[in-house]
Amino acid sequence: MPAKIIDGKAIAADLREKIAADVAEFHASTSVTPHLVAILVGDDQASAVYVRNKEADCAKVGIKSTLHRLPAETTQADLLELIQSLNHYPDVHGILCQLPLPAQIDEQTILDSIDPSKDVDAFHPENVGRIAQGRPRFLPCTPHGCQHLLIASGIETKGAHAVVLGRSEIVGKPLAMMLMQRGAGGDATVTICHSRTKGLSEITRQADILIAAIGKTKFVTADMVKPGAAVIDVGINRDESTGKLVGDVDYEALLDVASAITPVPGGVGPMTRAMLLRNTLTAAKLSR
Ligand SMILES: NC(=O)C1=CN([C@@H]2O[C@H](COP(=O)(O)OP(=O)(O)OC[C@H]3O[C@@H](n4cnc5c(N)ncnc54)[C@H](OP(=O)(O)O)[C@@H]3O)[C@@H](O)[C@H]2O)C=CC1
Ligand SMILES: Nc1nc(=O)c2c([nH]1)NC[C@@H]1CN(c3ccc(C(=O)N[C@@H](CCC(=O)O)C(=O)O)cc3)C=[N+]21
């Protein structure tokens, strides 16, 4: 039987409807419009896709959004100054600084400078620590999106072997942490793989749930997947020849192996954006 295609676009649209209602209710009782500020330094490709859709998403749910586009040669001091001013500005509830940043800027310094109560990416060490301890303020958008896709598709994480490919601070590491936590969308037995992992395909073949977040086109092939596994493809890569967006897994081949799979586009990407809206509302509530 061909894999069930997990429709991230539709699941994200459902989430947005709920968020729009919550934003309206919050506004009715406080007169506050949640406000998200995104900062894009230079023009990374994946970031450009993200930015393109973010503004429209915000408008759909009644969230105000502002984009600061800074040139690729922006200095760290200038970026820090902008973030400091946004930290102090009461009308700004969420701050997101797009990664990666140009080489002259130290990412950790920048992420550490964002007020943790406005940190809608959940990248600040205080927020990461809270996630690790199982008492989150914000959940990171992409991992939360993946987890929600599993829950909404009825894929049991409890007791499942989840294999996460990739250990980045933005996707792999926090996702592994969340899948391991007690409760809904958690209670999985988690293995994390990275570029130094030996015998990768033996490990991926043990996965009931396989999550690919490595940034390599069609890296996960059919022989790496156990028949019946659920596959979540986080990758957003540009296919050199067609110019289209493609994931980290060989989607066509996996349709005959997996029990469920997310497409790219239309899988995790829209979920990331929906979770960002949710976090912006949470940040606005925190500011009261
Ligand atoms: N859909 C969405 O909403 C989002 C999508 N993305 C996409 O997800 C992908 C991953 O992003 P991100 O986590 O930021 O990427 P990073 O480049 O930060 O991390 C990639 C990870 O993959 C590992 N890796 C690389 N090559 C291999 C290999 N051959 N075998 C095993 N592991 C490998 C790396 O290992 P090591 O640590 O050893 O270097 C690293 O841990 C990208 O395509 C990105 O565009 C990202 C964010 C959101
Ligand atoms: N601080 C920070 N936080 C991030 O969360 C972050 C980041 N920096 N840098 C870049 C990556 C990448 N990322 C994407 C999110 C959604 C889509 C997305 O919406 N994808 C659509 C594509 C739709 C289209 O083609 O326009 C889809 O997959 O269906 C893509 C990429 C977030 N990231």
Image (spheres, helix red, strand yellow):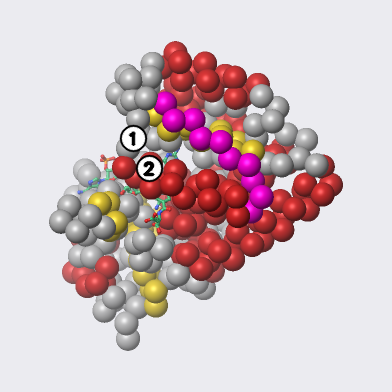
Residue identifier under label 2? 48
Q: Which quadrant of the figure has residue 89?
A: top right
Q: CA distance from mark 2 to mark 1?
A: 6 Å
Q: In the image, residue 167 lies at what x, y percent? A: 34, 44
Which residue shows up at 15% across the image and 56% down it?
241
Q: Residue furthest right?
A: 29
Q: In the image, residue 271 lies at what x, y percent? A: 49, 57
In the image, taking residue 179 as reference, residue 28 lies left or right, namely right
Q: In the image, residue 63 lies at what x, y percent? A: 64, 46
Q: In the image, residue 188 lies at what x, y percent? A: 46, 60
Q: Is residue 137 visible?
A: no
In the image, taking residue 12 as reference, residue 44 lies left or right, namely left
Q: Is residue 121 visible?
A: yes
Q: Are the two marked residues, 2 and 1, in contact with CB atoms closer than 8 angstroms?
A: yes
Q: Looking at the picture, which amino acid does disc 2 mark?
A: Ala
Q: Which residues are magenta?
A: 61-70
User: Is most of the magenta stretch helix, strand or loop?
Assistant: strand
The one nearer the camera, 285 or 156, is 285
Which residue shows up at 76% across the image and 40% down it?
32
The one nearer the camera, 160 or 113, is 113
Which residue shows up at 37% across the image and 25% down it?
71
Which residue shows up at 66% across the image and 50% down it?
62
Residue identifier under label 1? 43
Q: Looking at the picture, which amino acid does disc 1 mark?
A: Asp
